[in-house]
C-alpha cells in the first residue's frame, strides 16, 4: 500500500534521486516566490492564507476507495490554482506538505522534495493548464466553472500520481521486475477515483466562492472569464 501513497515515505525512493528532486523543488519554489510576488495584492495575500489553511484542514479528512482498499484526500493543487493562481497556489500546497511532514509525519522528511514536486508543482501546474483551456471553451456560466474545476482537479491528481511513477522508475528501492507499466496503471486507476472526490470538493468550493465574491477567484480575473449569472424565468422567457 505504501507504493500507492502520494505522500512518499522515507525509504521508498533512494537518496540520490530524492536529493535531485529536492533541489529541483527548491529552484521551482524560488521561481514561484519571485513570480508570485507580482500577483500579490490586497485580495490575493489574505486569500492565500485562507487557501493554505483550508487545504490543510480538508486533507485531514480521508475518504475510502473501496475498490482499491486505500483511502484518499484532497491534494489541493487545482483548488489553489483556481483561487490564488499557479505560482502562489504551488506555494500554498508546499507549505501544507512541509507542515504535515515535519509535525504530523505524513510523508518522509527526506522525501519532501519528491512530494512537493508531485503535489505542489506537477499537480498545480497541470490543473492550471487545464483551467486555462477549459475556461476558454466551456460556457461562461456557473455550470461551466464547476465542470472546469471538477475536470482540472480530477486529472491533476492523476498527473501527480504519474510523477511518483517516474520517480520510482529513477530510484525505487524495490525491484518491480520490469512491471513499471503495471505500477503506472494502478496509480492512475486509484488516483482517478481519488480525483473524483477531489473534483467534487474543488468544484463545490470554487463555485461557492465565485457566487459570493467572483473577484476573489484568481482564474476568473487573470483569464478574463466573468461568470454570467443565471437568468431568472418567471411568466415567460427573459
Image (cartoon, grey):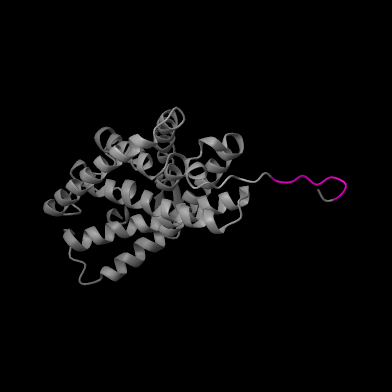
In this rendered view, identify the residue nearer to me: 63 or 46: 46
In the image, taking residue 43 as reference, residue 14 lies left or right, namely: left
Residue furthest to the right in view is 235
Quadrant including the N terminus:
bottom left
Q: Is residue 8 visible?
A: no
Q: Is residue 27 visible?
A: yes
**Residue 177 pos. (x, y %):** 20, 71
Q: Residue at x 41, y 30 (%)?
A: 45
Whether residue 234 is in magenta: the answer is yes
**Residue 155 pos. (x, y %):** 43, 57
**Residue 2 pos. (x, y %):** 28, 53
In this rendered view, identify the residue nearer to me: 42 or 121: 42
Magenta highlight range: 230-236
Chief SS of the magenta region: loop
Residue furthest to the left in view is 16
Q: Residue at x 55, y 47 (%)?
A: 225
In the rendered view, would you say 114 is above or below 137?
above
Q: Residue at x 57, y 50 (%)?
A: 146
In this rendered view, identify the residue nearer to me: 166 or 70: 166
In the image, taking residue 110 as reference, residue 185 lies left or right, namely: right
Amino acid at each position: 500500500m505504501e507504493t500507492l501513497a502520494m505522500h512518499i515515505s522515507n525509504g521508498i525512493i533512494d537518496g540520490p534521486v530524492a536529493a535531485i528532486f529536492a533541489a529541483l523543488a527548491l529552484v521551482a519554489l524560488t521561481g514561484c516566490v519571485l513570480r508570485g510576488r507580482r500577483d500579490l495584492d490586497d485580495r490575493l495575500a489574505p486569500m492565500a492564507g485562507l487557501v493554505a489553511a483550508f487545504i490543510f484542514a480538508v486533507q485531514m479528512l480521508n475518504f475510502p476507495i473501496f475498490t482499491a482498499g486505500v483511502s484518499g484526500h484532497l491534494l489541493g493543487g487545482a483548488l489553489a490554482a483556481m483561487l490564488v493562481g499557479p505560482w502562489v497556489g504551488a506555494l500554498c500546497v508546499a507549505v501544507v506538505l512541509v507542515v504535515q511532514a515535519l509535525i504530523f509525519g505524513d510523508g518522509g522528511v527526506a522525501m519532501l522534495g519528491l512530494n512537493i514536486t508531485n503535489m505542489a508543482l506537477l499537480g498545480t501546474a497541470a490543473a492550471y493548464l487545464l483551467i486555462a483551456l477549459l475556461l476558454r471553451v466551456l460556457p461562461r456560466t456557473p455550470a461551466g466553472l464547476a465542470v472546469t474545476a471538477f475536470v482540472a482537479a480530477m486529472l491533476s491528481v492523476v498527473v501527480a500520481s504519474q510523477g511518483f511513477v517516474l520517480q520510482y522508475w529513477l530510484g525505487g528501492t524495490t525491484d518491480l521486475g520490469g512491471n513499471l507499466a503495471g505500477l503506472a496503471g494502478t496509480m492512475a486507476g486509484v488516483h482517478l477515483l481519488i480525483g473524483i472526490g477531489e473534483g467534487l470538493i474543488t468544484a463545490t468550493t470554487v463555485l461557492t466562492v465565485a457566487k459570493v465574491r467572483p473577484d476573489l477567484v484568481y482564474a476568473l480575473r487573470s483569464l478574463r472569464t466573468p461568470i454570467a449569472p443565471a437568468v431568472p424565468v418567471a411568466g415567460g422567457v427573459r
